[in-house]
Image (spheres, helix red, strand yellow):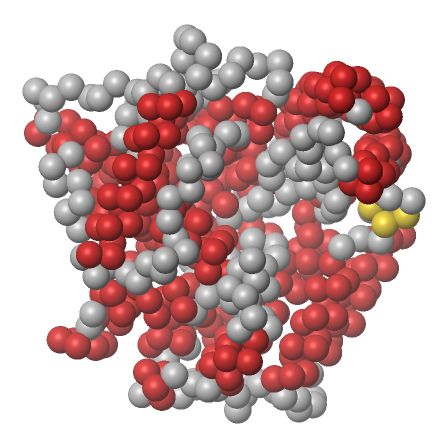
Amino acid sequence: MKLKLKLRLALALMTVPSFFLMVAAPSFAQTKTASADYADLVALYEEFRGSVAPPVVNGVPDYSPAAMARQFEQLKELQKRMKAIDDSDWPIAQRVDYMVVSAEMRGLEFQHRVVEPWKRDPAYYSTTNLGFGPKMHGALAIPKLPLAPDELIEFKAKLDAVPEALKQARANLTDPRGDLARLAIVQKEVEENVYGELAASAAKLQPALEPSAQRAKAAAADYKAWLQQIEAGLPAHGGVGEDNYAWYLRHVLLLPYTPEEIAVIGEREYQRQVAFLKIEEHRNRSIAMPDPVTTRTEFDEKRMKEDEDLLAFLRDGDWVTIPDYVKHDPDEGPYQFPFEKDPSKPGLFDPPLDLHFFFQAEFRDGRPLRAHNLPGHAFDSLQAARDDRPVRGAPRLFFVNGVRTEGWAFYLEEMILQAGMLENLPKTREIDYILGAKRAARVLPELKMQKNEWTWKQANESLIARTPKWMEENDAVAQFDIELYLRQPGYGIGYYMGKVELEKLLSEVAMQEGAAFDIKSFHDRFRAAGSIPISLIRWEMTGRDDEVRTMRD
């Protein structure tokens, strides 16, 4: 899918856009021990990215103490060389890339200094790529059988490595945490069933694969049983701690807020969403909420219309440039959480319907969520696949772009409401506010878990209790969300804080440009900056370095 645009994009990267030439030059300088040019930064970045994956021995990623110690020492040397690069005279666009590289290096540093998932997080050893948050290198995608002969050999080798990977996991997990172990137990329950289904399918379609699948199933069951034996005696909390969390926000995510400021903003936004929801509910009190669709055919027909309406609204209204490659995908289907991929569970449309929170919304009117996922996440992915810039075109590591990614997607949910797309859809406006309240209700649980004040259970209960509609006990969305926000700091707050950052930037650029401000141009320039922290996009678009100065060292 990658397009051959290297020459054009490289020239664009080396040339400062005319808009940027009008803004003030950056004011902060650095003390350096050596000088280098942009090509040296790119070479160092490529070397760094080549060092991130663990060594693989006999098909098993090596997370042993010795291997991780070697990786950490290698990182320290790379960071030392990074600090020796003097970028003070570079154009802003290249200095932004410098900070992106630095943030990713700090992300790996944070993994080693603080998170240490190979030691603390039993769920890190997810051997399947079913969507369970952060996971070990080389997790398996389960294919549809039968496989071609060459594919069979490769997949069987990976499957045969599962028992050894989980055996080594037990040795590596010297500091496991109770909440993380309990989440891993649920994960391994799903994996055990997935491997069981694979074995049954292999028995019919590809018998050579069945013994390997059975061994993987047994290994998952043994690992689960081991965790069940030890989890009650483990330290309960799995967060990184308040000081570490604050450092991560500023120096990896490049987010210019303290945890205390985020808590205040999150609560204020929660109150705003609930208040606006109640105003809408009163305004629409004589109108019934539409029923959810009940069949896949109904769902697909509804989604196609919603996607086409949404893209037409954004294009025709000159809100943002939507390339032709952003379009409805008839094969996408409903998004399913890992728990819903458990073959022991009923199918999604099997009666009676058991709809989690997001399906309660989308199966009634999917426009707000489609704004989030089509011109939001899908557009981001498709555009990134076409970006050949040496730093910005690389997939981000360690969630460095997470606040930007979720912020843009969530911003679009409310933007279509404010822009008038939902003017004649009163109950859809309610759905939009329900979704917004739920996003805001995520903020406090993440903050409390990462400060080790709340357990996963307490955070889960808070999210369920404060979501104003459609979220019951054991809801799959609440289950997945709270696991992800514990295991990936910054994810739960990223939706709201990313939207806040984007709205702040819009207001700054609008006031800076005055009557010349054009919102389509703003959105296009924001997107053209790439998948990087919004504080860095702000530096490019306004010339203001007051935030990034505090994140430099």
Is residue 264 shown to the viewer in this render? no
Residue most toward the top? Answer: 352
Q: Would you say 551 lies left or right of 359 here?
A: right
Q: Nearer the viewer, residue 451 or 511?
A: 511
In what quadrant of the picture does the N terminus appear? bottom right
Q: Residue 35 at what x, y percent from top left?
A: 66, 91
The quarter holding residue 141 reads top right
Question: Height in image: 82 above or below 493?
Answer: below
For the image shown, how many numbered marks are present on the structure?
A: 0
Q: Residue 328 at what x, y percent from top left?
A: 38, 44
The quarter holding residue 434 reads top left
The residue lying at 45 percent from left, 32 percent from top is 333
Residue most toward the right? Answer: 58
Q: Would you say 341 lies left or right of 474 here?
A: right
Question: Height in image: 354 above or below 58?
Answer: above
Q: Nearer the viewer, residue 182 or 311?
A: 311
Q: Nearer the viewer, residue 391 or 209?
A: 209
Q: Nearer the viewer, residue 501 or 285?
A: 285
Q: Residue 272 at what x, y percent from top left?
A: 23, 41
Q: Residue 427 at what x, y percent from top left?
A: 18, 29
